[in-house]
């Protein structure tokens, strides 16, 4: 691999430059760049980049879980083609380079809160990386003397992510930081240390829940982490300030300009419009608009749109929707997600608590997206949803979490943990696999330059270590 030294990004007036020296696929230098960027400039760069990486990974996975569908027939995003993910790979590694630079500067300045943020953000980015690809370069990835780093076991990197989160929590709890988090440059929690600690625990609960198929799955540890995490939607980790448009708004705008993007899958639309489950979900109008027929219709993954242009009678992300309106927040970790994790952790030991957490997760997400209290309560009282403790199933839990984590990369983790057992969930038309996709292939930037170390991928149906 070649190395890079460049300005990472300048984001509006609140983002200052940050330098790069690391494991990348370009070689560029600028002798005028500072080696000591301001620590709060790095705070802005790293919080922004992490949020954008949630978008980039979510953009990939939302097709795999059939929340989105391509308007084009047999599009690579729909049919499990081994699309090149070099761009996403690169942005994840770039983010960690800046994060580590911020941490090094924070150690020098005894800026303990910045150290805490750095640990949490590295765990966040690396956990997304291994959830896409499995084994990845880690221990040697940022060593400037190694041009072809070895691949580390994804399980070992996962364990490191948990270690990072614990270290981050410990750093936040150190007394007398010499530099405090700057609210205007912390684009996720506005300098709120307590909110960062809650996010560290939220991510810990998410990662511990990832191993639900394994013998070492530990519900009490998950519940312990959740007890220190968010207590309401107000705690959510989200990005609300952007260089230009918010990411999913930019998708909706492109579509409105005939650069077709952000179309909703028939699988997702049917799950909400009453077709699949027999109940209309009031979140649907907060995501998309009705078609020219006055109803909600999605696009079958792999089949493409009916007709031409956007006037086809199919749904796509709305310019007025919660997720895709101008300035829409980019959700990273939410209270609603945590309630579903709680429901899963309690499912086998306290069904009543599990059931209530499931209902609370639905309510939290509906409140988040702007569903009226009357519509929310009617949905929660519908017998399809309010099945009672005795009839509560994991299928209901995973179905509702699937809706509540719309467009988030964690939805694909859940789909794989649940073995895609959602009702009426079928392979895309023209699928290149005979079963559902379980991983991404390694990017061409790796297979062309670090081929000797790249693990063999027999099929995109190969299961990652936690999925077996």
Image (cartoon, rainbow, N blue to C red):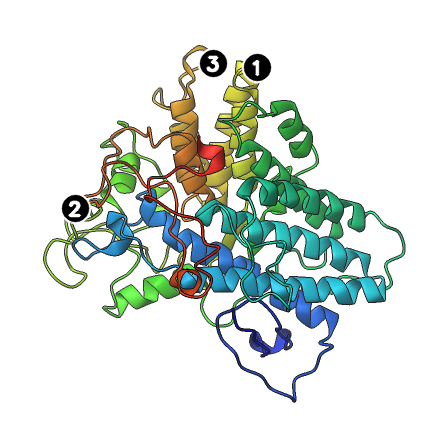
Give whichever of 96, 64 is nearer the camera: 96
Sequence-wise first label, 3 or 1: 1
What residue sits right under mark 2 in the picture?
430
User: Do labels 1 and 2 touch, CB within 8 Å?
Assistant: no
Left or right for 243, reference 420: right
The residue furthest bottom is 32
> Would you identify the image quadrant in which residue 18 lies?
bottom right
Q: Find residue 389 and name its label.
A: 3
Give whichever of 440, 393 is nearer the camera: 440
Left or right for 77, reference 230: left
- Residue at image position (56%, 48%) is 152
Circle 2: is it few (<14), some (14-19), or many (20+) Cα within 10 Å? some
What residue sits right under mark 1 in the picture?
350
The residue furthest top is 390
* Secondary element type, mark 3: helix
- Residue at image position (62%, 65%) is 97
Residue 45, image x and y in percent?
A: 61, 68
Q: How far apart are marks 2 and 3 (CA)?
A: 40 Å
- Residue at image position (24%, 51%) is 315
Q: Find residue 410 and name its label.
A: none
Q: Is residue 395 above or below residue 109?
A: above
The residue furthest front is 452
Residue 29, image x and y in percent?
A: 58, 83
Mark in front: 3 vs 1: 1
- Residue at image position (19%, 51%) is 314
């Amino acid at each position: 691999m070649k190395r890079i030294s460049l300005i990472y990004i300048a984001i509006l007036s609140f983002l200052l430059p940050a330098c790069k020296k690391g494991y990348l696929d370009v070689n560029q230098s600028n002798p005028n760049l500072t080696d000591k960027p301001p620590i709060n400039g790095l705070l802005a760069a790293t919080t922004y980049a992490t949020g954008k990486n949630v978008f980039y990974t979510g953009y990939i996975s939302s097709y795999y879980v059939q929340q989105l569908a391509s308007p084009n027939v047999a599009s690579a995003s729909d049919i499990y083609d081994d699309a090149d993910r070099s761009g996403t790979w690169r942005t994840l590694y770039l983010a960690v380079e800046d994060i580590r630079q911020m941490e090094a500067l924070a150690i020098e300045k005894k800026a303990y809160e910045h150290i805490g943020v750095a640990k949490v953000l590295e765990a966040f980015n690396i956990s997304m990386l291994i959830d896409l690809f499995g084994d990845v370069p880690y221990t040697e990835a940022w060593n400037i003397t190694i041009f072809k780093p070895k691949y580390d076991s994804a399980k070992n990197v996962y364990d490191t992510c948990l270690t990072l989160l614990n270290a981050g929590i410990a750093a936040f709890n150190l007394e007398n930081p010499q530099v405090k988090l700057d609210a205007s440059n912390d684009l996720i929690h506005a300098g709120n240390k307590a909110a960062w600690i809650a996010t560290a625990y939220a991510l810990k609960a998410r990662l511990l829940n990832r191993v639900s198929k394994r013998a070492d799955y530990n519900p009490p540890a998950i519940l312990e982490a959740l007890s220190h995490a968010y207590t309401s939607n107000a705690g959510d980790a989200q990005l609300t300030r952007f260089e230009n448009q918010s990411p999913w708004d930019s998708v909706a705008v492109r579509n409105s300009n005939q650069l077709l993007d952000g179309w909703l899958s028939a699988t997702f639309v049917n799950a909400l419009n009453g077709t699949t489950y027999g109940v209309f979900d009031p979140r649907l109008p907060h995501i998309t608009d009705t078609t020219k027929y006055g109803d909600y219709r999605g696009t079958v993954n792999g089949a493409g749109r009916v007709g031409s242009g956007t006037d086809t009678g199919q749904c796509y992300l709305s310019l007025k929707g919660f997720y895709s309106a101008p300035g829409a927040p980019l959700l990273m970790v939410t209270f609603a997600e945590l309630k579903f994790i709680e429901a899963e952790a309690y499912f086998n030991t306290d069904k009543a608590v599990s059931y209530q957490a499931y209902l609370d997760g639905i309510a939290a997400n509906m409140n988040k997206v702007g569903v009226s209290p009357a519509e929310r309560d009617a949905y929660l009282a519908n017998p399809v949803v309010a099945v009672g403790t005795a009839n509560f199933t994991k299928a209901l839990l995973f179905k509702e979490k699937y809706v509540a984590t719309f467009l988030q990369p964690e939805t694909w983790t859940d789909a794989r943990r649940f073995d895609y057992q959602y009702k009426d969930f079928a392979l895309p038309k023209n699928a290149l696999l005979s079963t559902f996709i379980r991983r991404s292939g390694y990017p061409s930037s790796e297979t062309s330059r670090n081929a000797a170390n790249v693990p063999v991928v027999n099929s995109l149906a190969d299961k990652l270590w936690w999925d077996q």
